[in-house]
């Protein structure tokens, strides 16, 4: 029996030691508090669950969905884009449902890359841009991002010969894991750059609705000319506590949407229609629910930032996303500091290095655990004297 290289030769997360320590601690009955997972802890709101209840009794929903999604779902997405970002999209040709953004992102590589083609992407990053590229036989060109630049991918850091050869540029703002944000002016530069180098821009906008302090995140498609070269992924997962239901959308240039539809129609049969009906309800009728929900995260964010500062870390307060991303103390690697938190305080955080080399020197704390668990975790940091870094 032979397993394909794409299964056995995937980049491995440098998380091995930590996972082993967590398992050992839990086996000893120690209550380990995890700030590691980015998965909303609260329930899907009732008004959305009601749509599912109704949807299960709607017998057409018992049959195969269309890959591209219900016309009503696509319209709720494009209506929402119009209300939210002022962008007019054609629901027939410029929007498609995805089984969560992750599925669309992974399959996009098959739609836009031939074997050997280059996809340019940020480092650190959500891992699926890279893995999708690998599965398509493409080559990832990772652009290191920096705190000093607000974690904005600097287009000048891409060698011209790479940009000319590459087919795709991935971006993600508000950014996971760094919390970096981007302006429409930045997206404007990206559009010009992409046109100059004949690149497709794929923007992951999963966190546009999870924002704080009144910050209003833009859509990539708001930039002039973005519709000529770009597509954006949007997800209901993070905004509406819907990670378990698997629904999102891709919107943008009609040729790109059609290419993704062709790939998807050959590999999956779309999002269960009752789940699309949840999506319709969420997008059409959320009212102030999202604002209220974000207020809860903002409160956790403030507490986490304050606690980290109190032990001496230089934290930048994120304006969006579900994470606090911070530099580790001088002399520590990401993994060493994550280990110290686990060994000494029974707290799990994600080493920044697991999101790419440029994440080395940082850790990520997720805000998706209950207020009680956040409070308990942060209490463990009180008066913690960070030990001197291990000598290598
Ligand atoms: C969570 C996440 C996704 C995937 O979301 P789903 O819609 O649940 O698949 C995509 N991109 C980023 C950056 C994420 O953090």
Image (cartoon, rainbow, N blue to C red):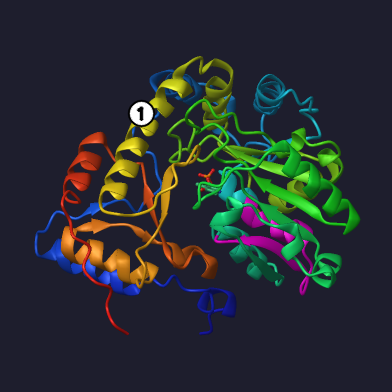
158 to 51, vertically: above or below: below
* Residue 148, percent from left and from top: 57, 55
Residue located 64% across and 70% down the image = 134
Residue located 63% across and 52% down the image = 152
Judge by depth and name the residue closer to the eye, 92 or 13. 13
Q: Position of 291 compared to 34: left or right?
A: right
Q: Which residues are magenta?
A: 105-124
Q: Position of 15 compared to 158: left or right?
A: left
Residue located 72% across and 39% down the image = 220
Judge by depth and name the residue closer to the eye, 113 or 4. 113
* Residue 141, percent from left and from top: 69, 69
Residue located 40% across and 29% down the image = 44
Quadrant occupied by the C terminus: bottom left
169 to 272, vertically: above or below: below
Instruction: Please identify the quarter of the rendering in which residue 305 is found.
Output: top left
Was residue 108 drawn as part of the magenta stretch in this picture? yes
Was residue 143 drawn as part of the magenta stretch in this picture? no
Residue receiving disc 1: 296
* Residue 87, percent from left and from top: 76, 26
* Residue 306, percent from left and from top: 30, 42
- Around disc 1, counting alpha carbons within 10 Å, would you say few (fewer than 14), some (14 to 19), or many (20 or more)? few
Considering the numbered disc 1 on the image, is that residue within a helix, a strand or a loop? helix
Judge by depth and name the residue closer to the eye, 307 or 142. 307
């Amino acid at each position: 029996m032979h397993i394909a290289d794409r299964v056995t030769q995937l980049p491995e997360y440098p998380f091995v030691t930590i996972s082993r320590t967590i398992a050992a601690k839990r086996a000893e009955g120690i209550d380990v508090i995890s700030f590691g997972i980015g998965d909303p802890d609260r329930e899907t709101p009732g008004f959305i669950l009601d749509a599912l209840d109704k949807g299960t009794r709607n017998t057409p929903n018992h049959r195969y969905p269309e890959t591209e999604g219900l016309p009503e779902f696509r319209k709720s997405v494009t209506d929402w884009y119009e209300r939210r970002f002022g962008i007019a999209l054609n629901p027939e040709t410029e929007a498609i449902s995805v089984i969560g953004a992750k599925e669309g992102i992974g399959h996009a590589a098959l739609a836009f890359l031939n074997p050997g083609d280059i996809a340019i992407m940020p480092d650190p990053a959500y891992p699926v841009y890279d893995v999708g590229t690998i599965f398509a036989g493409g080559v990832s060109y990772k652009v290191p991002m920096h705190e000093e630049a607000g974690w904005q991918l600097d287009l000048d850091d891409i060698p011209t010969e790479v940009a000319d050869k590459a087919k795709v540029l991935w971006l993600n703002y508000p950014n996971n894991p760094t919390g970096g944000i981007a302006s429409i002016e930045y997206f404007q530069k990206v559009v010009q750059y992409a046109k100059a180098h004949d690149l497709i821009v794929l923007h992951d906008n999963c966190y546009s609705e999870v924002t704080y302090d009144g910050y209003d995140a833009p859509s990539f498609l708001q930039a002039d000319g973005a519709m000529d070269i770009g597509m954006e992924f949007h997800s209901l997962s993070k905004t509406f506590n819907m990670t378990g239901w698997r629904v999102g959308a891709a919107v943008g240039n009609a040729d790109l949407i059609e290419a993704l539809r062709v790939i998807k129609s050959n590999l999956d049969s779309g999002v269960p229609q009752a789940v699309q009906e949840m999506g319709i309800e969420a997008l059409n009728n959320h009212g102030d629910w999202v604002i209220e929900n974000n207020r809860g995260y903002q409160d956790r964010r403030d507490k986490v930032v304050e606690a980290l500062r109190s032990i001496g870390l230089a934290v930048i307060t994120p304006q969006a996303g579900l994470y606090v991303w911070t530099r580790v103390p001088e002399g520590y690697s990401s993994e060493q500091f994550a280990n110290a938190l686990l060994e000494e305080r029974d707290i799990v955080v994600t080493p920044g290095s697991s999101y790419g080399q440029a994440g080395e020197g940082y850790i990520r704390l997720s805000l998706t655990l209950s207020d009680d668990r956040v409070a308990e975790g942060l209490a463990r940091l009180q008066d913690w004297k960070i030990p001197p870094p291990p000598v290598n």
